Amino acid sequence: MENLIVECRSLYKSFNHQLALNNLDLEIERSQVYGLLGPNGSGKTTTIRIALGILNPDYGSVRIFGGESPLSCRARIGYLPEERGLYPRMKVREQLAFLGAIRGLDYREADKRAGLWLEKLGLAGRAGAKTNELSKGMQQKIQFASAVMHEPDLLVLDEPFTGLDPVNSRLLKALLLEQKEKGVTVILSTHRMEEVEAMCDFIALVHEGESVLHGKLSDIKASYGRNTVSIAHSGKTGEFDGLPGVLSVSDSGRTARFRMEKGADTQLLLGELMKRTRLDSFIVDEPHLEDIFLEKVGSVPSQVDNEAEHQREVIR
């Protein structure tokens, strides 16, 4: 149990008599990138804020770093909330230095680290600008720097890729993996399934306040078997009805994915597809995480329309 960084047991939480968490358990081990997934209103942000001590559960317990309460070890935690927690009229470098200082750094050291992180993020030229003069993507990078500059042992990121273009998303992904290599435990909550598949070791899928799927990502995907066929084609949409052994089709025009029945013969599918369209590629693979997500959750309406509206606190 010494390896457990976050341990949540039997968490219940409601807002205005609406149940947000329902007997939720969570275990996160040291030096993992742990994906916390779920549709809007599923309870992800509520889980994060209870784990960090921002909210109290109605029932249940939270232990951080093997036994400490969240509030007793804030200096060891970095948090990037879904809603920006920056001061809009403060200058960028002054703000980073201030946030580093209130997380336990000597102010001189905090100012030094603020300069280093601005260089790393390509924002050194905006050090004297006010935060509200920056783009949303720039503000997101500043907020990331504020979460990591005090070198936390646990880093919690709620929708960290919001507002970032592909270049800056790649930069942030590299910085996250750099944190993992240093031994930092990362909790990543995001809707971007491709980022989860690229970075996460373990995942938990939360739906209507309950954990409906959790475990090692590679094991979860392997448990479904190689039941997915991906193709690149030059045909028209709507040409894939009535294919043998196919449960569902997702066709985006140039590419398509087929979820197969258990034991279906993919060679029969290949033969039929070759009659209907020109194939540029045909790949039999494990399902993507997005396929698993849709199978588990579907299009069920969220139980809480916007859980973050109930919780405007930002950890400091």
Image (spheres, rainbow, N blue to C red):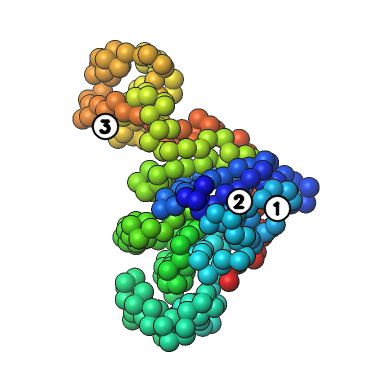
Residue assigned mark 1: 57
At x 31%, y 76%, the residue is: 119
Amino acid tagged 1? Pro
For label 2, the SS is helix
Sequence-first disc among 3 and 2: 2
At x 50%, y 80%, the residue is: 101
Amino acid tagged 3? Ala
For label 1, the SS is loop
Residue 159 is left or right of residue 276, and the answer is: right
* Viewer-nearest residue: 287 or 155: 155
How packed mark 1 is, by other alpha carbons closer than 10 Å (few <14, some 14-19, many 20 or more), is many
Residue assigned mark 3: 232
* Residue found at the far right of this picture: 17
* The C terminus sits in image quarter: bottom right
Residue assigned mark 2: 47
* Viewer-nearest residue: 291 or 81: 81
| Residue 258 appears anywhere in the view | no
| Residue 120 appears anywhere in the view | yes
Sequence-first disc among 3 and 1: 1
For label 3, the SS is strand
Residue 285: x and y in percent read: 31, 28
Q: Quadrant of residue 208?
A: top right
How packed mark 2 is, by other alpha carbons closer than 10 Å (few <14, some 14-19, many 20 or more), is many
Residue 252, above or below 1:
above
Residue 274 is left or right of residue 15, and the answer is: left
Amino acid tagged 2? Thr
Residue 70 is left or right of residue 239, and the answer is: right
Residue 205: x and y in percent read: 53, 40
| Discs 3/1, front | 1
